[in-house]
Amino acid sequence: MDLSFVKEQLETFSTFAGAIGDFLQLPPQILDQLSSLSSDAPEVPEAPGDGGDAAGGEV
């Protein structure tokens, strides 16, 4: 039995498994970056309600 073929297949599989592991870590990294961006964003002021003077007031 040629063990070099088995060794080559195991090395290929380990490389492939490592690539899958790296790929599976991407979604949590992306979500972490998005959540940090949204927490760093400045707050948007609220629009004035119906009773505010910004709507023009009475004539």
Image (cartoon, helix red, strand yellow):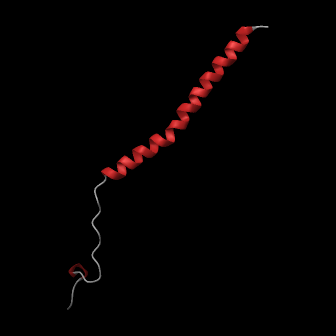
Q: Position of residue 23 (x, y in %)?
A: 55, 35
For the point 62% across and 26% down, the residue is 16
Residue 1 vertical placement versus 29 (above, below): above
Q: Residue reaching furthest right?
A: 1
Q: Quadrant of residue 9?
A: top right
**Relative to 53, residue 30 above or below:** above
The number of callouts visible is 0
Residue at image point 76% right, 8% down: 2
In the drawing, does residue 24 fall left or right of residue 40?
right
Question: Which residue sits at x=45%, y=43%?
Answer: 30
Closer-to-camera residue (17/44) = 17
Q: What x and y, as percent, mark residue 47?
A: 29, 72
Q: Is residue 7 left or right of residue 54?
A: right
Q: Closest to the observer: 50 or 57?
A: 50
- Is the C terminus in the top left, top right, bottom left or bottom right quadrant? bottom left
Tell me which residue sits at (27%, 66%) in the image. 45
Left or right: where does residue 7 sit relative to residue 31?
right
- Tell me if residue 18 comes above or below residue 24 in the rendering: above
Pick the quarter of the image with the N terminus.
top right
